[in-house]
Amino acid sequence: DLIVLDEINVASGWGLIDVEAVVKLIQDRPSDVELVMTGRDAHPRLVELADMVSEIHKIKHPYDKGILARKGLDY
């Protein structure tokens, strides 16, 4: 089974959800459940508990040419 916690790192960083609540979720999940937690600036405690941590960096983006965000693509 797979659970995706989209932007959970941002939510915990802004104080919308307690980091310790996320820690408890990680620790208490069944062994057959994979968690994918997204969002930048993950709390160090969450990084410590993670099996894999990745960062994605922009190399090129339409914003660089002044192209504004497009509905359905960027938001």
Image: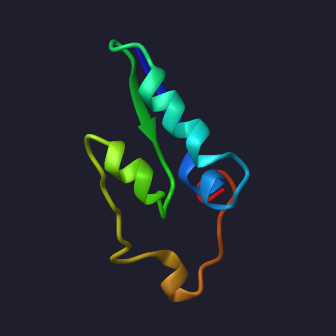
20 is higher (above) or lower (below) than 57: above
40 is higher (above) or lower (below) than 31: below
Rendered location of residue 43, percent (x, y): 48, 58
Query: Could you tell me which residue is drawn at 45 percent across and 31 percent down?
Result: 26
28 is higher (above) or lower (below) than 45: above
In front here: 35 or 47?
47
Rendered location of residue 51, percent (x, y): 26, 40
10 is higher (above) or lower (below) than 57: above
Image quadrant for the C terminus? bottom right
Please say which color scheme the image uses. rainbow
Task: Please give left or right for residue 43 compared with residue 32 in the image.
Answer: right
Query: Could you tell me which residue is drawn at 61 percent across and 60 percent down?
Result: 13
Rendered location of residue 3, percent (x, y): 48, 25
Task: Please give left or right for residue 73 compared with residue 54 in the image.
Answer: right
Rendered location of residue 1, percent (x, y): 40, 14
Query: Could you tell me which residue is drawn at 59 percent across and 55 percent down?
Result: 73
Residue farthest along the right direction in this orientation:
16
Residue farthest along the bottom direction in this orientation:
65
